[in-house]
Amino acid sequence: MASGNRAILIAGPTASGKSALALDLAKTMNGVIINADSMQLYKDLRLVSARPGSDEEAQVPHRLYGILPASTASSTGAWLRLAERELDMARDNGRLPILVGGTGLYFKGLTEGFAELPDIPVEVRAKAREMADRQDLDGLRQAIFDLGDPQAARDLADPQRLARALEVLMATGRPLARWQQEHQSSPLLAPDRCLKIVLAPPRPWLHERIAQRAKLMLADEGIAEVRALLALGLSDKLPAMRAIGVPEIAAFLAETADYAETLHRLTVATRQYAKRQETWFRNQMSDWQRVDPSDKINLEKFLKIC
């Protein structure tokens, strides 16, 4: 690559065309595509998570797609360890790593470093999870605030991340942010040696693609995928069981929602998720280059910035 860049990082909201751009770049630049989307790690969620199909995977190497069972609760730290191995292999094989996905924390850890959570004693984890299960979101935030972590109570909105903050607080006596600051690792990639891209499509264009994706999820293959996942009898607290599409199609299979209502729920949930992603990228990755994918990207011109 020109300018000494060692990797291309492509982030963006769901349905924004990240995988297609990554494929074009990988074919042109002898690249290997490395997954940076937390849901596309799960082998049980090919259609629901919009993983690349077998035809795309046959064109260029794809790594870290469909590698985990749905029974696994992965983490940013675990992904970074896997990504480090793939980056080393790409370098050894003379291939350009192209990391693509919608999980902002993965990219942040990749370019800024990451603090592993401490080992949590079983009894502390059980007590923290019991407290989290008893509380709604506001109650959980108040509990964390009262125990001494006002920053986590204010800034975190995801129940799983709030539960982790509670575990760290109870196990170490330190707020999550302080623990992370004290145990920060070095980044795997130097930010100034990467081409960092966020796809930023116009909202109407993205909403149309989201509507199309919702229909695909509710087609026979998507329903069969969720039915097979539900048959495993897994806890509904696992990340794979909370993936957009799983609870909505589960309700459809249970006949508590008809097709029209399920399609509406899928569309709304995906739009809300895309909005959260866009907010994250805007606030946490403001120095990344914005690219509008709605006007078909001219690959020849695009490559001039690589």
Image (tube, rainbow, N blue to C red):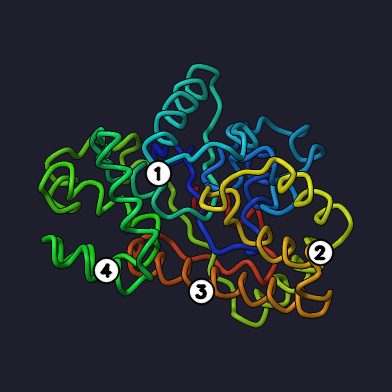
Give the mark toward the camera: 1 or 2: 2
Left or right: residue 273 versus residue 48 is left
- Which mark sits nearer the N-terminus, 4 or 1? 4
From what the image shows, is residue 94 above or below residue 124? above
Residue type at mark 1 is: Cys
Marks 2/4: CA–CA distance = 35 Å
Q: Residue at x 11, y 41 (%)?
A: 182
Of badges 2 and 4, nearer the viewer stands 4
Q: Image quarter for residue 42?
A: top right
* Contact check, label 1 and label 2, Cβ < 8 Å: no
> Which amino acid, by three-letter code, is at mark 4?
Arg
Identified by mark 2, the residue type is: Leu
Of mark 3 and mark 4, the one earlier in the sequence is: 4
Q: Secondary structure at mark 3?
A: helix
* Residue ID for mark 4: 141
Between the C-alphas of marks 3 and 2, the distance is 22 Å
Q: Earlier in the sequence, mark 1 or mark 2?
A: 1
**Residue under label 3:** 275
Taking the image as drawn, is residue 31 in sight? no
Residue 194 numbered mark, or none: 1
Q: Nearer the viewer, residue 121 or 106?
A: 121
Real-space Cα distance between discs 3 and 4?
A: 22 Å
Circle number at residue 218: 2
Point out residue 234 in the picture as x, y percentages from the top left corner. Answer: 61, 44
